[in-house]
Image (cartoon, rainbow, N blue to C red):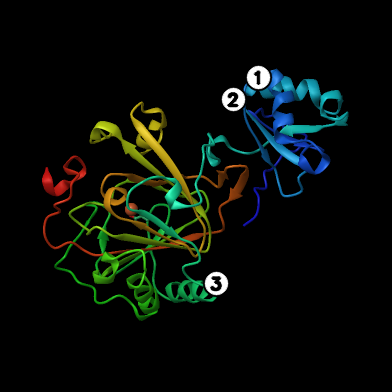
Amino acid sequence: MGLARFGRRSSGDREASPNLYVANCGPAVGLSHDAIAAVFSRFGQVQGVFPADDTGARVIVSFSQESFAKAALEAMNGRPCPDLAGRALHIRYSMLQQHSIANESFLVSLMASELGIDGLYLWHDFVSAEEERELLAAIDDRPWTCLAKRRVQHYGYEFCYQTRNVDTRKHLGGLPPFMSAILKRISSLSDLDNATNIVLDQLTVNEYPPGVGLSPHIDTHSAFEGLIFSLSLAGPCIMEFRRYLGGAWLPKGVADTEREDSDNHPNVIRKSIFLPPRSILLLSDEARYAWHHYIPHHKIDIVNDSAIRRASRRVSFTLRKVRTGPCECEYPQHCDSQK
Ligand SMILES: O=C(O)CCC(=O)C(=O)O
Ligand SMILES: [Fe+2]
C-alpha cells in the first residue's frame, strides 16, 4: 500500500487548480506539513497538505479556492522562502482532480471498536496472502457480470439491483467449494455467539476499479437476515457509515449522487473505517439495520495523515443469509417489511 502519487501539470499547461504541487518541500527536508500549511495559509484557506509521493520532499497543498492557489504560486514559485528554512520551492498546479480525493479529511478509524457503532466488527488478516491469491484466482476463472462501473458475481441467489432484493424461488445452488474454509472460519469466530448457527447462503463478489465506490445504502431488510460479512481482497478502501437522526433519510426519488453530496445534512452522524485487504467486516444489529454504508468514489483516500491510493482493484466477497419471512427488527423506520 503506497502513498499517493499526485501529478503535476507540465510547465506549458497554465490551467489553474486549487491544488498546488510543491517540490523541495516536506518532512524529508525538515518541513512539517503543519509548518507548510501555516505559510501557505497566508494566501487563503488551506484545506490540507498531503504527501505528493513517498519521497517526503514533495507535497500537495490543497486550497479551498483557485484564486488562493494562484496567489501562492505567483508569490512563492522559485523563490527562497525564509519561513521554510530558506528553501526555494518549485510550484506547479497539481493535476489532481478535486473529485478524485476525499475533499474533507475526518478521522478514519482502523478498529471497529473506535467507531462506537453497535454490531460493527472488523477482523484484520482474516485470510492469509496465499488464501487471498487462491480466492482471487477462483473468481477470475468464473464469468463476471458487468455493471455500469464495476463487475459482480452472484452465488446462491442472484441479487437484483433494480429491486434491491433476491428472488428466493430461484436458488442457484450452494456456495462454491472455494468458500468452504472461509465459511468454517466465520462460524468459529469466538466473539460471536450467534455466528455459529447461521448458514450463509448468498455471496456477491464485487470488483471495484480505482475511483469506483458504492452509493450509500442499507442492505434491504426483507432480503437478508441480520449478519452481513464483507471480506476485502486485493486493495484497500474506506467505508463510511451514516446515521440520519430522526430516521429521516432523503426523500425517495433523490438521486444517489445527491445523497452522496448531502454531507452537510445537519442531522447526520458520519463515521469512517479503513478496510485493508484480507480483513473481514461484520455488520450486525444497529450497524446492519440502521446505518447506511458507503464507499466513497475516490482514487485516493486520506487516512488520517496519509494519502492512500486505491489499488488497481478491490474485490469484496459479501456473504449473507437470504431471509424467507418478514424482517422484525427494532428499526421500523428503516425496515421495508414494517412499512
Ligand atoms: O464491497 C463491500 O465491502 C460492500 C458491498 C455491499 O455493501 C453490498 O454488496 O451491499
Ligand atoms: Fe451493502
Residues 49 and 91: in front is 49
On the image, numbered disc 2 is attached to which residue? 64
On the image, numbered disc 1 is attached to which residue? 44
On the image, numbered disc 3 is attached to which residue? 129
Rounded to the nearest angstrom, the CA distance separating label 3 from label 1 is 46 Å
Q: Are marks 1 and 2 in contact (CB under 8 Å)?
A: yes
Q: Residue at x 52, y 56 (%)?
A: 236
Dot 2: few (<14), some (14–19), or many (≥20) neighbours within 10 Å? Answer: some
Q: Earlier in the sequence, mark 1 or mark 2?
A: 1
Q: Earlier in the sequence, mark 3 or mark 1?
A: 1
Rounded to the nearest angstrom, the CA distance separating label 1 from label 2 is 8 Å
In this view, the mark in front (2 or 3): 3
Quarter of the rendering containing residue 319: bottom left
Whether residue 160 sits left or right of residue 16 in the image: it is: left
x and y, in percent, of residue 266 in the image: 36, 26
Q: Amino acid at mark 1?
A: Gly
Under tag 2, what secondary structure? loop
Dot 1: few (<14), some (14–19), or many (≥20) neighbours within 10 Å? Answer: some
Which quarter of the rendering shows the N terminus?
bottom right
